[in-house]
Image (cartoon, coloured by chain):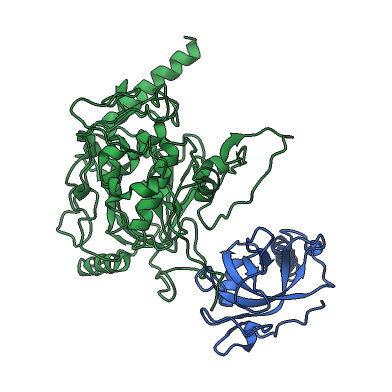
Amino acid sequence: MKNGAWRVAVLTAASLFVSSFLIAPARAQRVTDPGFKSVGRGAPLLVDLNDREMTGATIRPPTAGGKPDDPSGFIGSARNGQSPPGIQPLEVDLFTSKDFYKDRKLWSDRRYFRCNSPAAIEDLWGGNRTNLIGDNPPGSAAWGHCDRDYPREAIVSPYGFKTAQAHYEALLEETRRRGGPTQHTYATVPGEWTGRYMRPSGTPGNQYWFRMRHVQVPTILSLLTEEYQTRMVQEAYHHGHTNKAMWPSQFCWPEGFMRRWHEAAVREHQIMVTPSLVQIMAGVAQNFITDIHIGRQFNLEGAVPRLGPDVPRWYGETIGFWDRDTLITWTSNIQGWKTHAAFEHSNKMQTIEIYTPNRDGSGKFLGLNHEAIFYDPEALVEPVRIVRNLVKMSGFEEGDPYVFIECLQTIYAVDGTATPVSPGQVIQYEVPDMLGRPWADIWEKYWEKGMEKPEEKDIFSFK
Amino acid sequence: MNAQSRIGGMLAVTVAAIVVLAASVRAHHSFAMYDLKITKVFTGVVTRVDPSVNHLQIYFAPMNAERKNVERNEAGQPIVWSVEMEGSAQMAKLGVSVNSFPPGTVFSVGLHPLRNGQTAGSREGGMFRCPDKTPPAPGMHCDSVQGHTAVGNAPLPKPTE
């Protein structure tokens, strides 16, 4: 190894070692205790995902998607056409079916997916650079561990609110009873928040279920409405069976709101705090800019609450208030889209997010506990929650600056297959319907011939 | 620098900023692609509203003369046109948005078509939304339907062909 490479390796190891100490108080995936019994924040997680093992089947590469906590080697229970001991495979499953729409009754059986997690299914053909599809694909696809899962009860919101609005108003009222909301000035605003934070999925001890590597597919499906179940299985089929991944960012399409929580879509976060606006920036293929407007109120007229005109925004609009040094936010007016290996969300998606400081025993600021509750009555049968930690690395006085991303397309769908093309190459290009489900349009046109899809509503006929 | 010249300087900077901003709004693309001598008027069914920041687009399938269905190509597929208008925020203030014009909405609009004959145009004149699931009578437009919604104050333009 050359000197430069050694130096990088040693620095990386030292950095991980130091950060493992720095984040010690926040290492477990727990919710920061607000210090009182709250109506809508700080409820403990039922299960810490960091205590659970990946479902598989996967091989986590040491780079390009591998994370510090990831185990090495094959994670799964059988491969290359074998089935796991003690498990009776289904006669038809995702990897042998000719029409997944007809198999709806089997979707609740984890064997239909060979006990693979949603993210593992996209790994099978090499989606993340390791291959477990076997010698006679797709029928020879590997199996995950059927006895591993993350419980549904730990995913759903522990709060009883039906809407984000009710949740936000209850937290606001609670804060009022506590003498708030706190009206910060430049002298009092928590300036220690301003700075750079570690990549969430690269932070030791920061596993959370939306990474989709510790859950069975039916567990996630049980959170979804019938239509969104179909959409998720459709994607799983084209990940695991036809090998036609349609990840939006591969085409420089928008990432979509929920990708902010995806393991691969964001790296380091940059946070800036002022009395009237808190800004969070992150991104890999596209920019995620979350502007939290402090003290403002949504316009409640129209399809969904919003700040600006009646125009859905890819990453929504966000208002918030302070309860001392805790920031409580409400995001609405979000454009529906997808997160690959997870589920689609609709234009009705709204979130309540709580940012609470993590401190060590001496009170030193270590970063933020980020608790997010997702409300989407079109996609979700009940609200769900994601809890993670944002660990501060530094202020802005050091480190690389944020790179504003301009995604230039190099991969195109050529005859229904994502294909890198070179300058000067001529291809036939079908303009995608970007406000619909362009990924599904490609699958349905090229890879679902002969399948019995649910009939679409006819909007063109009038009696 | 005296106060008068300072004010003059500030005014010049302000005017320059306005000119630059206005240019940036208007210079997203040239409208010379459209044939301003031709005006078409359609009543169609919305397939999608694209709320682009610069120019909101409505994709629609023109209805047939009977107003019972839409014009179709030889393969039986709806022929889809697009009409572009002002930015999404401005159009939202006029009542045109993803939420107010969902797929299936019937509306009438005038446009200047592309010079090259492709199925797209630039909006001209007023625009009218029919009540839900209530197309106009044969040969008529949404401004003739009771309960219609007008977008702006202008009438539909007169077609040139």
Residue displayed at 42% across by 28% down: A137
Residue A454 in the image, given as x and y percentages of width and height: 43, 57
Residue A161 in the image, given as x and y percentages of width and height: 24, 64
Image quarter where the N terminus of chain B lies is bottom right
Chain B display color: blue
* In the image: residue A311, left or right of residue B4: left
Q: Compared to A304, does A235 lie above or below?
A: above
Image quarter where the C terminus of chain B lies is bottom right
Residue A402 in the image, given as x and y percentages of width and height: 51, 41
Task: Answer yes or no: is residue A194 visible.
Answer: no
Residue A91 in the image, given as x and y percentages of width and height: 29, 36
Residue farthest toward the bottom in the current orientation of the protein: B146
Q: Compared to A63, does A202 lie above or below?
A: below
- Along the viewing direction, whichever of B141 and B100 lies nearer the viewer: B141
The chain coloured green in the image: A
Residue farthest toward the left in the current orientation of the protein: A37
Residue farthest toward the right in the current orientation of the protein: B37
Q: How many marks?
A: 0
Quadrant of res B94:
bottom right
Task: Answer yes or no: is residue A189 visible.
Answer: yes
- Along the viewing direction, whichever of B38 and A292 lies nearer the viewer: B38
Quadrant of res A411:
top right
- Along the viewing direction, whichever of A3 and A336 lies nearer the viewer: A336
* In the image: residue A317, left or right of residue A176: right
- Along the viewing direction, whichever of A390 and A136 lies nearer the viewer: A136
Q: Compared to A20, does B9 lie above or below?
A: below
